[in-house]
Amino acid sequence: MKVIKTCFVIVLIVVATILLGCIQWDTNVSGTDGQEPGVIALHYQPMQCEEMPWAEYKTGTVTTEEATQIWLEKNGVLGAEVDEISNGAVCEACNVCPYYYGYAVAVDSKYESKLRKLGFGEFVE
């Protein structure tokens, strides 16, 4: 499982780097934390029985990844690439155990502090 997560993160970073490399960066974007453009990959790990903060945007045919992107944009994080990742088997205790999935987000590093304030963090094995 550790190897799969590591490979996934590497592929995600490479793809995001290629995609974000085609963008002309505006260094005067309001709300940035002053970092040079680069790609970061962070992880959101929901807990059992916890409603996702982006749940209100998951309606009709909107996927969870799309709903997450909408929520991030509404919170000032633009151009995020979101992927749902499986954590395998977990326990089911509410607010104690993680859900069996989490979310990987690759985005310009200027949004790192915003993502962390929104609950995203490092990948945990």
Image (cartoon, helix red, strand yellow):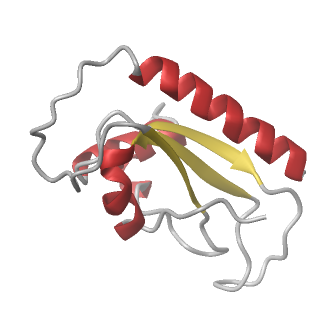
- Residue 75 lies, in percent from the top left, at 25, 54
Left or right relative to 120: residue 72: left
Left or right relative to 30: residue 44: right
What residue sits 63% from the left and 73% below the top?
Answer: 47
Which corner quadrant holds the C terminus? bottom right
- Residue 3 lies, in percent from the top left, at 88, 45
Q: Is residue 58 visible?
A: no
- Residue 68 lies, in percent from the top left, at 43, 46
Q: Using the rendered view, name the quadrant where residue 108 is placed.
A: top left
Instruction: From this view, report whether residue 54 is shown above or below residue 7.
Output: below
Residue farthest toward the top in the current orientation of the protein? 22
Left or right relative to 123: residue 37: left
Instruction: From this view, report whether residue 123 is shown above or below residue 77.
Output: below
Instruction: From this view, report whether residue 36 is shown above or below residue 92.
Output: above
What residue sits 79% from the left and 77% below the top?
Answer: 92
Q: Is residue 40 visible?
A: yes
